[in-house]
Image (tube, helix red, strand yellow):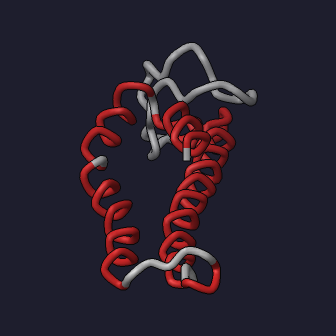
Amino acid sequence: MTNEPSNFGHRTPSRAGQRIERWDPEGERFWERGARYVARRNLIVSVLCGHVGFSVWSLWSVLVLFMSPRTGLGFTPGEKFLLVATPMLAGAVLRLPYGYAVARFGSRNWAVFSSAVL
């Protein structure tokens, strides 16, 4: 006997592009009907989007260190600190609207949009 509720819904997430209409992680039939594919796909896309975002911010911090007068970009140590701190501060402040946007537009749509903008 499974823990799956009887009102699972009429649509099974078995094809690409479909969404999970009702989340039931304890139901065995839920995963057999194709939710495993959708959940795995969403996890992979989320990890890749997070990796791209983290990589961009991390690379910026390292690149600022190499901005020297020899390259034509002579910044003082204070200006370099500001160049690194500003994106970090913006990221910290934008967490609130970012969290709201996930709930408003959906995590998949928002992940694709924010990665494209980044």
Residue located 25% across and 44% down the image? 96
User: Which residue is the extreme one toward the right?
Assistant: 15
Residue located 66% across and 33% down the image? 33
Of residue 104 and residue 66, the one placed in the foreground of this image is 66
Percent of width and height locating residue 41: 66, 45
> Can residue 1 be seen here?
no
Residue located 39% across and 36% down the image? 102
Left or right, residue 15 beside residue 33:
right
Percent of width and height locating residue 89: 28, 61
Percent of width and height locating residue 114: 51, 41
Of residue 80 and residue 69, the one placed in the foreground of this image is 69
Q: Which corner quadrant of the image does residue 116 belong to? A: top right
Q: Which corner quadrant of the image does residue 68 belong to? A: bottom right
Residue located 49% across and 35% down the image? 110
Left or right, residue 107 beside residue 118:
left
User: Which residue is the extreme one toward the top?
Assistant: 10
Q: Is residue 96 above or below residue 33?
A: below
Q: Is residue 40 above or below residue 108?
A: below
> Can residue 14 be seen here?
yes
Percent of width and height locating residue 37: 68, 42
Q: Is residue 60 above or below residue 29?
A: below
Q: How many marks?
A: 0
Q: Is residue 66 above or below residue 11?
A: below
